[in-house]
Image: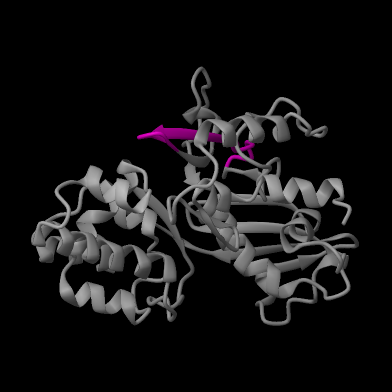
Amino acid sequence: MILTPSALYHILANPTYRGGIRHKALVYENAHPAIVDQDTWDAVQSMLAGQSVDRPNTPRIAARQLLQGRIYDAAGEPMTPTFSSNNGHRYRYYASRQTLPGQASSHPAMRIAMGTVESFVTDQIAPRLENNFEPDLDLITRLRSAITRVTLKPDMVQIRVKAEAIATPQDLPLTQARRDEHEWDISFPIILKARNGAKMIEAPGAPKEAGRMDRTMVRAVAMAFDWAESLAKGELASVADIAAQGKFCKTHVAKLLPLAWLAPDLVELIIKGKQPAALTLHQLTAKPLPLDWDAQRVLFFSA
């Protein structure tokens, strides 16, 4: 079997090897034990980023993102890929110029997790792609080819796509879509919400519940309960013991273990897939879990 450069690129950029799981445009970090250590992963991603010919001065963060070079803030300024690190893990964002070191701007700055905005754009545009538009390519490549500009505003996401790439958006009000000879401009009203320190995009009238089981989240809760039971029985004595037995990173275990003390009704909602539509495992573990069950309900499940 001969691997093409494109196929090799997708293998090397697959987050599964560093312990992540990709769902659409989102990557859930620390979902399982990593196959490749972080230093090796970062070195490979830097090499991949260095092969980019259209934006050679972009920061070298992971593989090329869906909206890199295509996303702008409300003032029309480009939003730049950036990242922050916490306990050895990188969290990736698109940020307005004003939020970057040494940059200044007169308009309000915006910063949003890459996965959040890319997942929203994917969910809106992917179902509207013409079936015969570059059908032999993977979805992310097709979307990058179709989308020419995304403008993120506090109350709206405006997406510009090539006319030949998208079916006539009959399901959109005429005031939300405009077509010229070459492109569609489509505007989606949104509500930006903050939950547990992270911004989430919610479409007005969107379902409040996920409506399906998040297997990554369920698996994390199940493991946390197993670990807590082993600690209570004296079978294991510490987070280090849990990590050694399961060949996990100690930081990963320490973040997941508190899920064993989630309120029972919240656990039931997660198992049934009735958690909030925008809730992810990262948001569930990003900050210390309150021991008070009412505080947990307010933090994660309040409207």
Q: Residue 286, can we see it?
A: no
Q: Is residue 157 left or right of residue 268?
A: right
Residue occupying the point 31% across, 42% down:
251
Q: Nearer the viewer, residue 96 or 123?
A: 123
- The image quadrant where one finds the N terminus is bottom right
From the top left corner, tell me how far across and down residue 202 is, in percent: 45, 65
Q: Nearer the viewer, residue 132 or 4?
A: 4
Residue occupying the point 36% across, 43% down:
249
Report how many numbered discs are placed on residues in the image: 0
Residue occupying the point 21% across, 48% down:
288
Magenta-drawn segment: 75-89
From the top left corner, tell me how far across and down residue 219 is, in percent: 37, 67
Q: Nearer the viewer, residue 291 or 228?
A: 228
- The image quadrant where one finds the C terminus is bottom left
Q: Is residue 171 above or below residue 59?
A: below
Residue occupying the point 63% across, 63% down:
122
Q: Is residue 225 left or right of residue 131?
A: left
Asked whether residue 5 is drawn in magenta, I would say no
From the top left corner, tell me how far across and down residue 261 is, in percent: 16, 62
From the top left corner, tell me how far across and down residue 64 is, in percent: 68, 42
Q: Is residue 179 above or below residue 39?
A: below
